[in-house]
Image: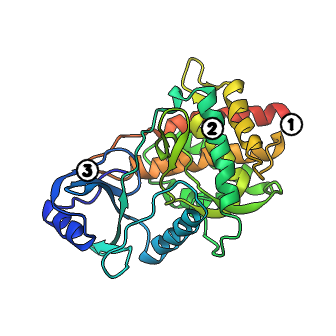
Amino acid sequence: MAVYTRIPKTEAVRIAKRFGLGEVERFEGIAKGSVNTNYRLVTSRGTFFVRLDEKRTAKEVAAEQGLIAFLANRGFPTPEPLADSKGKRLAAYKAKPLAVFPWLPGADKEAQAFSTKDLTEAGAMLARLHHATTGFPTRLPNRFGLVAIAARWAHIRKKARIPATHRAELDETVADLSRRPAPSGPVGVVHGDWFCDNLLFEGAPITGVLDFEAAATDALAFDVATAINALCWLPEDPDRFRKPRVDALLAGYAKGKGPAPVDETSLGFWLRATALRFTVTRILDFRMRTSSLRVEKDYRDFLRRLRWWSAQAMRSR
């Protein structure tokens, strides 16, 4: 979430009219995030979230909406996009797909502020998601899977404005992970972005899960590893993962009877792969793209995670 395409208030008025949202009172960009353009729309009928997809096609967005509808039918707490008077849930602005969502109650919190109880809740909700998506009929390509990330890195590595030593580290990791077969385990729909700003709390429980933009069909352990990398890292001196935090998240996933394997071998591979994924995409999104409004994110935060897990892998060999 950020602002890459400026949407004028006149367009906000048209959006509100099309979706029957009432009179526009405020329309303001949201700085958080990295991929899409997002606005907060306040009208006489309430508050709404407007998302303009910067990279995906209408067909890809429609597939995400199909997944969200499937989850809503199963009682999973994620907001469905609103429909206009003709029943259509997808509009467009400057030939880019645009959707409007209800603004859910609750608030996110920084990952460092997650207590072990919060982490257990996050693990349990992830298990709930993996069960809720069982039987979803559409296979969703993973634009951020290992093969796709390796191809993306090959495309940008020479143009990436990063030190040569970092480029060499990433080259080595891509080569090493590409040589290794992925651990066996169940495949299903993964959220792909289990970060703190996609989890809403009202008091203790998680009351809402946002942003299925990166949802895909892949190894379910991919999602567990993403959650650990996103929520359990503490940028201290030295940077590290605290075992009680990882254990709390995995305990919640186990309590929810999550189907992904969480043994050291399976997770070790995916922890490196997902740390690589966010290192590469942050280089692309924050070193090679500009935005008029966003919270900057440093790829080196995930490069440090990648180094950590690579060191653990070396010790276990």
Q: Quick one: which residue is furthest to the top in this view? A: 237
Q: Quick one: which residue is furthest to the right in this view? A: 317
Q: Quick one: which residue is furthest to the bottom in this view? A: 86
Residue beneath the point at 63% across and 75% down: 138
Density class for disc 3 (Cα within 10 Å; few <14, some 14-19, many ≥20) is many
Residue beneath the point at 36% across and 72% down: 83
* Left or right, residue 316 beside residue 33: right
Density class for disc 2 (Cα within 10 Å; few <14, some 14-19, many ≥20) is many
Question: Which residue type does callout 2 highlight?
Answer: Glu
Calculate the distance from the C-alpha at mark 3 to the C-alpha at mark 2.
Answer: 30 Å
In the image, which disc is placed on residue 121? 2
Q: Tell me, yes or no, whether the two marked residues, 1 and 3, touch with CB atoms within 8 Å.
A: no
Among the two numbered marks 2 and 1 on one chain, the one whose residue lies closer to the N terminus: 2
Q: Nearer the viewer, mark 3 or mark 2?
A: 2
In the image, which disc is placed on residue 231? none
Calculate the distance from the C-alpha at mark 2 to the C-alpha at mark 1.
Answer: 33 Å
Circle 2: element type: helix
Residue beneath the point at 25% across and 55% down: 41
Circle 1: element type: loop
Among the two numbered marks 1 and 3 on one chain, the one whose residue lies closer to the N terminus: 3
In the image, which disc is placed on residue 29? 3
In the image, which disc is placed on residue 317? 1
Among the two numbered marks 3 and 2 on one chain, the one whose residue lies closer to the N terminus: 3
Q: Which image quadrant is residue 245 in?
A: top right
Q: Nearer the viewer, mark 2 or mark 1?
A: 2
Q: Nearer the viewer, residue 116 or 235?
A: 116
Circle 3: element type: strand
Q: Nearer the viewer, mark 1 or mark 3?
A: 3
Q: Nearer the viewer, residue 180 or 268?
A: 268
Question: Which residue type does callout 1 highlight?
Answer: Arg
* Left or right, residue 203 beside residue 232: left
